[in-house]
Amino acid sequence: MKAEKKLSSRRTVLLSVSFFSGIAMLLAAQGAIDEFLSHPAFLVKEVEVQWPEGVKSRPRRFRLNPPTSIFRVDLKTLGYAFQRRYPSVEVESVERVMPNRLVATMRPRRIVGQVNLSGSYYLVSDDGVVVAPASSVARPELPILLLDGFRGPLRVGSGLESPSFWKASELLATIHRDGGIAGHRVASIRVSGQDLFLLLDCGAEIRFSGDHLAVGWQHLVGLLRNRPELLKQANYLDLRFEDPVIGEKAKSREKAKRSRRA
C-alpha cells in the first residue's frame, strides 16, 4: 500500500514538472516568434500605391506611423482607409511583398451616370457610390438619372440607398452589355414607381416596366431588328405591355399613309 502511494506521488510530481516545463517551453517559443516577427528586416515603413493609368497628382507612397511588421498589418483595414480617402477609384488589392513591402493597387470606378438632385449633378459609379462633388452643370456624355422619391443628401464616398437607382443601373448595364441602342446615346433615365422612361439623344423616349425589364428589352431588340430607322421615326416606344405601343412622329405617319395610298 505504501509503495503504491509513493508511486502515485512520484507520478504527480513528474506530471507537475512536465506541465510547467511545457509552459516554459511554450513561452520561450512565443518569445522567439515575437522576436522574429519584430525583426527590423520585416518592418514596413510605407505603402506603395499603383494608380490607374491617367490618374495624376496622387501620392505614390504613404508612410506607416509607426512602422509595423509586415505580418501584423491588417490588409482589410488598410484597404478600407484608402477607399474612404479616394472614393473615385476602387481598391483592387493590398498585398504583402516579402520581406518588407506593401503594395496597394487601384482601379478606376465605372461611372454610369449623374444623379440630378435639386439642380446639382452627382457622378455615380455602377456600384452606387458618389465619386465627385456636386456640379451645377451636367456632363453631356453621361446620362442624367432622375430618381423618383430620392431626396439625398449625397456626399462623396457615400452609397445611394435608392431602389430607383438600382433599376436605372440595371437598364444601363443591359444597354452597355449589348453595345448600345442602335448607335444612340442615352440622354436621361427617369424612374417613376416601377416604370423607367429612357430618353435618347434623337428625342425618342422608350418606356420600360422595371418588373419586366428583360422582356421589354427583348421587344426593343426585335423592333429595331425589323425597323432599323424606328427610333428616328417615333416619339416614343412603350414596352410596358405585351404588345408594344409605338407613337410615331406626324411626318412618319403621313409618309406611311402616302405609301399605303400609292
Image: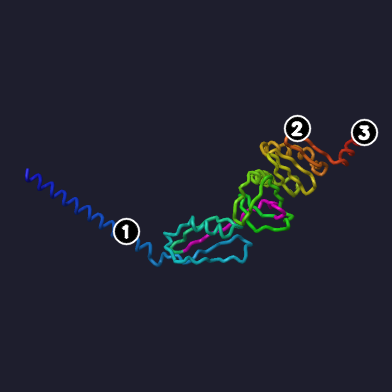
Residue 243's disc is: 2
Please state if 23 lies on the left or on the right of 83 as rendered: left
Among numbered discs 3 and 1, the one appearing first in the sequence: 1
Residue 26: quarter of image: bottom left
Viewer-nearest residue: 225 or 212:
212
Residue 30's disc is: 1
Q: Position of residue 72 (x, y in %)?
A: 42, 59
Q: Position of residue 208 (x, y in %)?
A: 71, 39
Among numbered discs 2 and 3, the one appearing first in the sequence: 2
Q: Secondary structure at mark 1?
A: helix
Query: Which residue is pictured at 63% across the width and 46% down the height?
Result: 162
User: Range of the magenta residues?
Assistant: 101-120
Please state if 36 lies on the left or on the right of 193 as rendered: left
Does the segment drawn in magenta span residue 65?
no
Among numbered discs 2 and 1, the one appearing first in the sequence: 1
Give the CA separation, mark 3 to mark 1. 96 Å
Main SS class of the magenta portion in the image: strand
Does the segment drawn in magenta span residue 103?
yes
Q: Amino acid at mark 1?
A: Gln
